[in-house]
Amino acid sequence: MGIKDDAVEVRAQGWRTLAALHGLIEGELERSLQAESQLSVVEYTVLDALNRQDGWHMRMQQLARATALSPSATTRLVNRLEDRGLLTRILCDDDRRGIYTELTPSGSSLLAEARPVHDATLERALEQAQALPELATLVGALPTLHVPA
């Protein structure tokens, strides 16, 4: 195996470690959020992303990026959340093709109820992952990551 092959394997191992950590965290969050708030992780992510807009709204394309979903999957998700009364859609005044989405008061209330469940579950999942030698280094690196807002 050459140096180039070694570099590829290091990156592949890093990706597998990241995927394992993500899977552990997402599984724990999914169980807790469903049990306590009847929300999936991606539904929570949508409500949280909209809440971070400080009372403003987001275009559907922005929501798709925030949730890592395709445009059609995002539309289906928004339809479900709108049917539950958790968000609403607004047509853009400037561009009739543009559709914005924003939280309803019910969506804000459910998010406020779900946030402590999410945060406590995330903390527990990270503690579990920290105890696993194959994930401990990655968990330890998380506090040093700074993502621009």
Image (cartoon, rainbow, N blue to C red):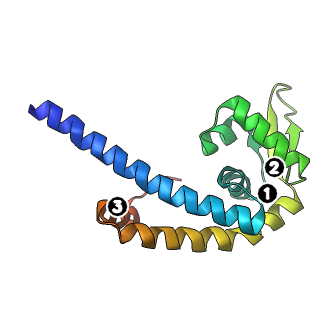
Q: Name the foreground residue: 108 vs 52.
A: 108
Compared to 99, does 132 lie above or below?
below
Residue in the image at 70% along x and 54% along y: 40
Q: Residue at x 32, y 66 (%)?
A: 136
Mark 1: which amino acid? Gly
Characterize the local packing of mark 3: few (<14), some (14-19) or many (20 or more) Cα atoms within 10 angstroms.
Answer: some
Tell me where residue 53 appears, x and y as whole percent. 71, 54
> Which of label 1 and label 3 is nearer to you?
3
Q: Quadrant of residue 104?
A: bottom right
Residue named by callout 1: 55
The CA distance from mark 1 to mark 3 is 37 Å
Please state the horizontal and vertical placement of residue 119, each as a whole percent of the image.
60, 70
Q: Secondary structure at mark 3?
A: helix
Asked whether the beta carbons under mark 1 and mark 2 sit within 8 Å of each other, the answer is yes
Which secondary structure lies at badge 1? loop
Instruction: Give the residue type at disc 2.
Output: Glu
Among the two numbered marks 1 and 2 on one chain, the one whose residue lies closer to the N terminus = 1
User: Which numbered marker is on residue 135?
Assistant: 3
Label 2 packing within 10 angstroms: few (<14), some (14-19), many (20+): many
- Residue 25: percent from left, percent from top: 51, 60
Q: Helix, strand, or loop for circle 2? A: strand
Disc 3 versus disc 2: nearer the observer = 3
Name the residue tied to disc 2.
102
Question: At 72% across and 29% down in the image, what residue appears?
Answer: 72
Q: Nearer the viewer, residue 17 or 90?
A: 17
Q: Quadrant of residue 11?
A: top left
Tell me the residue at 15%/31% (across/down): 4
